[in-house]
Amino acid sequence: MEPVYRTIIGIARTVFAAQGLKFTVTGDENIPARGGAVIAVNHTGYMDFTYAGLPVRTVKRYIRFMAKKEVFDNKISGPIMRTLRHIPVDRGAGADSYRAAVEDLRAGELVGVYPEATISRSFELKEFKSGAARMAIEAGVPIVPMVIWGAQRVWTKGYPKRLGRTNTPISIAVGEPIQPFEPASELTAQLHSTMETMLRALQEGYEHPAGAYWVPARLGGGAPTLEEANRMDAEEAEKKAARRAQSSDGS
């Protein structure tokens, strides 16, 4: 029993209802009823981790998400994240968070991971990091692919949040568990291919207005292409690194 986690999910559901969000969930029978598993989720917006928790409630389970350390440092969100036993990720010391995730998996937990590491500005799948595969292999647990579509319309990088009553449809699909195998690079490639197929299947049943900022360029939308988005990410990373270096020099 996890009264705090359950209460927060109840509050979230109330907020979702007030926003008029319309969820369509398929494949939730693929969530393991017990035992550890890596839940691999695509990343298009700031709220998609809250939606990813919905399918696992079919079997009354909870996800321990790996989230950047800054969220835990916040005086408001930090205590909540720690109480819910999410896993802080310090990009400067990633080995600690990796070990914590593997321990949770071995203890029978569901650990949520974004293989893309950052929000995809193009809303297409970015290249995957190998962490999800390596954790699954080391812990001896399956990877459960999950894709979400529509979350970027609520709140995404570079655009104002839309947290009022928008009646936004959000589609969630859960795929069959992928049993771990080596090498991690091949498991990662299979995971990416599987989630790509799942994502495109969700998109086929979703209305995409031409030119809309949240629609991929491939579907006639105003989002940047994957190549353009990758270039934007690289430029942003360079600027952040320069600011950190300048701050370090100043100290």
Image: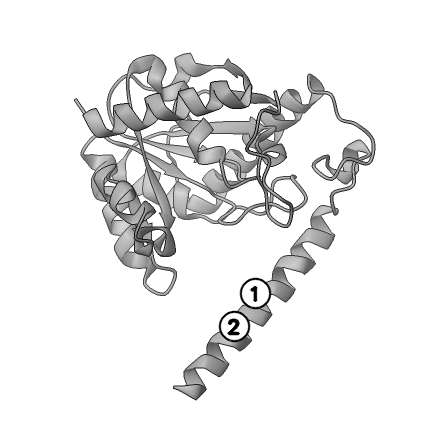
Does 30 sit above or below residue 15? above
Task: State which quarter of the image contains the N terminus.
Answer: top left
Give the mark count: 2
Query: Residue 220 location, x and y as percent?
Result: 82, 34
- Which residue is nearer to you in this view: 173 or 242? 242
Q: Residues within 10 Å of mark 2 (few under 14, many from 20)?
A: few
Question: Picture quarter containing residue 44?
Answer: top right
- Indicate the position of residue 179 as horizontal and vertical percent values: 38, 28
Mark 1: secondary structure? helix
**Where 3 sits versus 230, above or below?**
above
Separation (CA) of disc 1 from disc 2: 6 Å
Picture disc at residue 241 = 2
| Tag 1 residue | 237
Q: How is the image coloured?
A: one colour
Residue nearest the observer in this picture, 36 or 215: 215
- Identify residue type, mark 1: Ala
Left or right, residue 59 beside residue 131: left
Kind of residue at disc 2: Ala
Q: Residue at x 58, y 24 (%)?
A: 165
Query: At which x and y percent is residue 172?
Result: 53, 22
Q: Where residue 215 sits: x, y (%)?
A: 73, 34
In the image, is 200 to the left or to the right of 55?
right
Please report the residue visible at 64 percent of the width from the left and 50 percent of the height from the top: 158
Badge 1, how many Cα within 10 Å: few under 14, some, many 20+?
few
> Front-most of 160 and 190?
160
Residue at x-position 45% and y-position 25% = 15
Task: Report if residue 174 is visible in the image.
Answer: no
Screen quadrant of the C terminus? bottom left
